[in-house]
Image (cartoon, coloured by chain):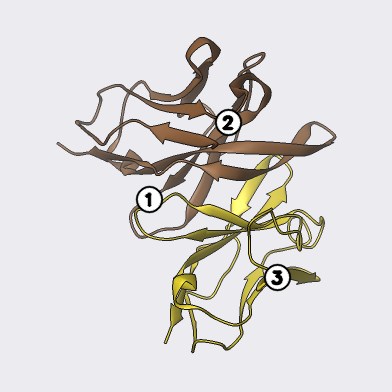
Chain colours: A brown, B yellow
Amino acid sequence: EVQLVQSGAEVKKPGESLKISCKGSGYNFNNYWIGWVRQMPGKGLEWMAIIYPGDSETRYSPSFQGQVSISADKSISTAYLQWSSLKASDTAIYYCARHLVPAVIGNYYYHYMDVWGKGTTVTVSS
Amino acid sequence: QSALTQPPSASGSPGQSVTISCTGSSSDVGGYDYVSWYQHHPGKAPKLMIYEVSKRPSGVPARFSGSKSGNTASLTVSGLQAEDEAEYYCSSYAGSNTLFGGGTKLTVL
């Protein structure tokens, strides 16, 4: 069974750093894109970024470029999302998801998410 | 790029059909056949229900179907069942970004 298991809830203060994780199992982690989706309180979903663990290629939403960093350690089938300095507005649930990439259109990848984790709640408050 | 527009709520009785709309623009929904739909029960992992407008992944019941006309995509749930009560999100390719709708809470009366 393909599964994505995310790290537990975090409570942080503004200005602190944070790295959350997502461990894949049941498939060849190296050969599938994996990424992150944000859900702020009471709001809809927002696509953030993806990474291809095989070669560490990354793609970011323009809204999140420079705000977060995505990485992966293929030796332990785990993807990460990292902040260097958290803000209160980073309070949200963060979902990791395996992304399928059926097409490349110019410089951009069409992708959709076929398997999701259960989410990691991040609370940033002073 | 703005989020896609979905009605906040929809409802139907068991056995009925309900359709949820998702409106974008010619730069996203209308420009490509790259719309997907996700079902989300609170506290659980979201689930892919439809991709590329109308394709169903293995294991998704045929009661779920997708379509598109112009800048609006639709998800139809036929033969509503109690377990269909959930939040539904549409998503579309939009070049450098992937957009989601705000979500529609489907209530089975």
Same chain check for tags 3 and 1: no
Between residue A111 and residue B50, name the one nearer to us. B50
B9 to A6, vertically: above or below: below
Residues at marks 3 and 2, CA–CA distance in whole angstroms: 26 Å
- Viewer-nearest of discs 3 and 1: 3
Chain of the residue under the numbered disc 2 shown in the image:
A
Q: Which residue is mark 3?
A: B65
Residue in the picture at 61% in, 62% down = B4
Asked if badge 1 and badge 2 are on a common chain, one would say yes
Residue A40 — which label?
Answer: 1
Q: Quadrant of residue A84?
A: top left
**Is residue B102 left or right of B43 when viewed as pictured?**
right
Q: In the image, residue A94 lies at what x, y percent?
A: 40, 40
Amino acid on which the number 2 mark rests in the picture: Ile
Place of residue B87 in the rendered image (x, y in percent of width and height, measured from the top left): 46, 66
Q: Is residue A29 left or right of residue A82?
A: right
Q: Quadrant of residue A80?
A: top left
Query: Is the N terminus of chain A in the top left, top right, bottom left or bottom right quadrant?
Result: top right
Image quarter (top left, top right, bottom left or bottom right) of the C terminus of chain A? top left
Residue appearing at x 58%, y 36% in the figure: A98
Pointer 1 or 2: first along the chain:
2
Residue furthest out toward the left: A126
Q: Nearer the viewer, mark 3 or mark 2?
A: 3
Q: Chain of mark 1?
A: A
Between B98 and A20, the one nearer to me in the picture: A20
Residue at the location (45% across, 26% down)? A23
* Disc 2 target residue: A34
